[in-house]
Amino acid sequence: MPGINFKINRTNNKNFFDSLSNTKVLYEGRNWELSLTSNYKYYPITIFENNFFYILLEGFIYSRTNEDLKKLMFTYSKEIFSENFNKNNDNTFENEDGEFVLFIYNKSLDKIFIQNDMLGRLPIYYSLTKKEIILSRNISFIKENSEVLFDKYLLANYLFLGYPLKDETLFQNVKRLYPNSIIYIDLKSFLFQKIERGNGTNFEQKEKTQFSIESLADELVVSARNRDLKGYKNIISLSGGLDSRLVGAAMSKANLDFEATTLSDPWKVDARVGNSEVEIAKELADIWVIKHNTISSGPAQFKEVIDLKELKWGLNHFGLAYLLKYLESVKNNFNTKINFFTGDGGDKVIKYQLASNNLKTTDDVVEYIKKFHRRFSLEQISKLLDIKTKELYANLWELVNSYPERNANYKFVHFILNERSRNWLFEGEDRNRHFFWSNSPFFSYPFFKSSMSIDDTNKINNKLYIDLNRVLSSDVNNVLYANTSKNVNSFSTKIFYLLKNNFNKLPNDYRERIKKILKRDVSHTNSYNYLLNYVKEGNKKGLYSGFVNAKELNKLTNIEPDQLKMLFTITSIISSDDFSHFKNNADLRDFEFIFN
């Protein structure tokens, strides 16, 4: 992954530094070093320096001009090291639109300050030992420079939900920095101080003033315009769904110069007949009078799986490896500085998020998550990992109960926006940045706050999508919606969401049974069977010993594709699998990892 790496050793010896490929040193001290990893030249870092401070900003504060940013950085650098600085409640960046990690070195005090943005849009990880402090945007850097440890309960949580919770990763001694957190490091005393401030969002609090769709639309346009980076080519990843078309509408309204690209994936088992995603995207592009590009990249092979493993270490499961081919194809297709717009997060920020059932207590929320959002059941996890899952349940309960909302329904919303968005969605977006800069206007913090503060009735049955598009680009509401092959205003689409909302009230087990009836069974496809057997072969060789119950794993037969993705991912990481079996076997060299 591209991004900064920082390491300090308690000794004065710097021979301990191990760097990744495509890494260059930016600044070095007596026993510490700051470096940047990136496989493309224009990865965004901005450096300011004078006699007192060395300042590095990774990413962007979109709402500031270059001159304004420079003034802010030097002023802020003075404030953060003063006695009057309010470490716990400073709101300098609360009204800024940015996705960034800020690194400041105070030369005279020999101290370092690190901060991320209000939503924690750029994942950054850290590891602490008695001898060293490592902080990096890249887990691979931490693994190269420190011994990382697995933990059964972290693996269990991953199998349960498909992503870690709170500040966790799959490794016991590698943590992820919370949003809007600050870190002070005293280079003389080796003191590490971390203050997790969060963004203070309480999703139960709604604006009392009358909601204005025009004002919210204007904020989305400002967000899109802020992201129009000088010297970059704007590309939107456009599908037949609702999220990316709303971003495109905002970009068009903001008069941005941009093109669209759509993944054509007829190889996928559930690809829509006639590949309607591409046709719908073309029609949307015609409305905005922009060029449309179709990308046919094909399914993932072992190279993409290896790359994804090294990039994200399980925080993207391997079922998403095919997207690396798509992103590589986009990069090669345009062969320039790309600013990649996506609709990521629309299903969190624009869509109705309240649970299908009325939740009254923390117990209700946890049970709801357990029924509707789990990947493996707690019973399956208990057998597979040979652990008691009471602790897993209790930790989830404590987490949900700690949220500031009093109403249990909004504690669930907090879970979706804080845990799933940050630990699943943001990690997926970050994968894109291995190829080029990627952003989503939905996560402008000012827009995010505004959208989450309106009454939820404005979001039922996609109402907010429809209303925003009506203001920004009304014709897009007449374009077919890929999920129903009807436009979003149609009776068919409304019935679809009525049925879907009731379907979502069913427990996960029942929903999976219905999906099996309605969807093509993939449990007998070549790739499914081979991968399940591949996992079991590793089990027989004892590669997962100490973590997975060999007998229980061997019993697995007809598990869900989503479960296979999770299982294949964690077993490959536990066993340090380099997939040489695929590399060295001529019959498997072109093996296609098709999970769906």
Image (tube, rainbow, N blue to C red):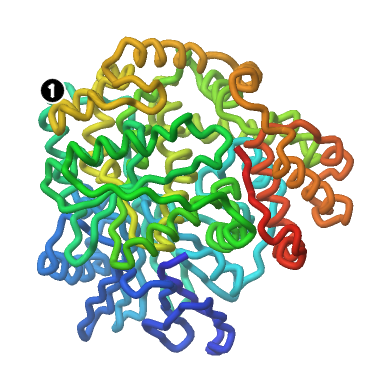
| Above/below status of 245 relative to 262 | above
Q: In which quarter of the image is residue 335?
A: bottom left
| Above/below status of 272 relative to 103 | above
Find residue 299 and report its horizontal and vertical position in percent.
56, 49
Q: Residue at x 34, y 35 (%)?
A: 279
Q: Quadrant of residue 351?
A: top left
Task: Answer yes or no: is residue 437 visible.
Answer: yes
Which residue sits furthest front? 274
Find residue 426 and report its horizontal and vertical position in percent.
42, 48
Task: Answer yes or no: is residue 118 visible.
Answer: no
Q: Which residue is drawn at 32% across and 76% down?
A: 105
Between residue 402 and residue 462, name the one nearer to us. 462
Q: Check disc 1 and report its element: helix, strand or loop.
A: loop
Q: In this view, does 22 lie to the left or right of 569?
A: left
Find residue 554 and report its horizontal and vertical position in percent.
86, 40
Q: Which residue is drawn at 45% across and 19% down?
A: 355
Q: Quadrant of residue 533?
A: top right
Find residue 557 and report its horizontal and vertical position in percent.
80, 33
The residue carrying mark 1 is: 209
Q: In this view, does 163 lie to the left or right of 288?
A: right
